[in-house]
Amino acid sequence: MSLIKHITLFSATAALALIPHLSHAEVLPEAAVEIRIPLAKKPTSRPMTIAYVPYLKQYFIADGGLAAIPGDPMGTASQSEIHVYDDSGKYRASAKPGLDNRSIYYNDNSRQLESVTYNISSEAGFGPNIGIFSLILNEDGSLKNDANEITGHNPAFGNANTIPSYDAERNRYYAKQERSNVIRIIESPKREALGEIRLDLAAAGARFDEIAHYFIAYTGVSGEEFALLDIDHKSVLVFNLEGKFIAKSALPSSLKLRSQNHINGTGYSNGLFFVYHETDGEFGTYYGFKVLK
């Protein structure tokens, strides 16, 4: 083979090797609004997270904060509701599956809508209806007032208030720990964490008390796997799977964030980062932002 042909072949091979890296998503400098979901009824407690079920083309917004009282034989079911909206943001229905929801997500592996409850780790003491549950859907896409337990309490999740994100590809959960840069990696039902990821907040120009306390989104995008709400700087911070800071996406200056946004009112689904704007509309509005191009 001539030297020229050898160089040409090498260059072509090198170019092909670069394609996967070039195909990684780009972090948008300014987040773009893709959908508004004005809440049609007052939340039963606090809106926690949001999930999208692709085959139904519906969003599910889960309330949390009404846990059953430990030791009360009549208080085994939470009164927190889950609300259903179509993909244009129109309200359809609500249901009470009996769970104090923290994280709600569609599991591509089980083909189920699932919920992780408050206090899954039992850090705050043992109580009824804690763990991971599948939510039961009717044929028309509405929810039943019932749920099936997948697993019970699991100390690997750490903090009682954590709002874990699910990674279907690796079958893992990522559970952000309270007021810290620590993300626990859990492979349920294993009862010990696989490890921890420490986010480089300093590189992002943020402190632990300026960001969401309990939630970090898993995006599923290689190289930009984590997205985190920075309340004080009104932006979404993007990190890779090792915790390295990649870039930030600025949220609109008109978006009013409150102290409660540290605790609840976030989510990531259908490729969008969701933020609850409490003062927009009668009962508040969920905004879905595109932060990765």
Image (cartoon, helix red, strand yellow):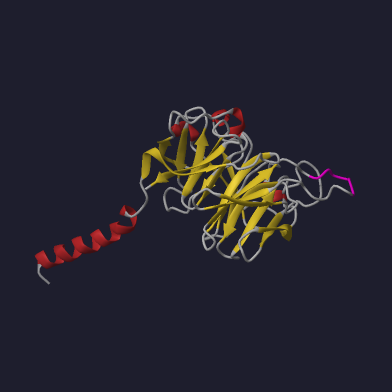
Residue at (37%, 41%) from the top-left corner?
28
Q: How many marks?
A: 0
Looking at the picture, tell me which residue is in the foreground, 210 or 270.
270
Q: Main secondary structure of the magenta part?
A: loop
Membership of 20 in magenta stretch: no
Expressed as whole percent of the image width and height from the top left, the position of residue 78 reads 77, 47
Expressed as whole percent of the image width and height from the top left, the position of residue 94 reads 67, 51
Looking at the picture, tell me which residue is in the foreground, 44 or 264.
44
Residue at (51%, 37%) from the top-left corner?
229
Q: In this view, does 22 lie to the left or right of 259?
A: left
Expressed as whole percent of the image width and height from the top left, the position of residue 136 reads 68, 61
Residue at (43%, 28%) from the top-left corner?
253
Q: Is residue 152 left or right of residue 23?
A: right
Q: Which contiguous range is marked in magenta?
A: 68-73
- The quarter of the picture where residue 263 lies is top right
Residue 129 seen in the figure:
yes
Residue 190 seen in the figure:
no
Looking at the picture, tell me which residue is in the foreground, 255 or 36.
36
Establish if 265 lies above or below 11.
above
Establish if 129 lies above or below 246.
below
- The quarter of the picture where residue 147 lies is bottom right
Expressed as whole percent of the image width and height from the top left, the position of residue 109 reads 57, 65
Establish if 207 lies above or below 113.
above
Looking at the picture, tell me which residue is in the foreground, 90 or 284.
90
For the N terminus, the image quarter is bottom left
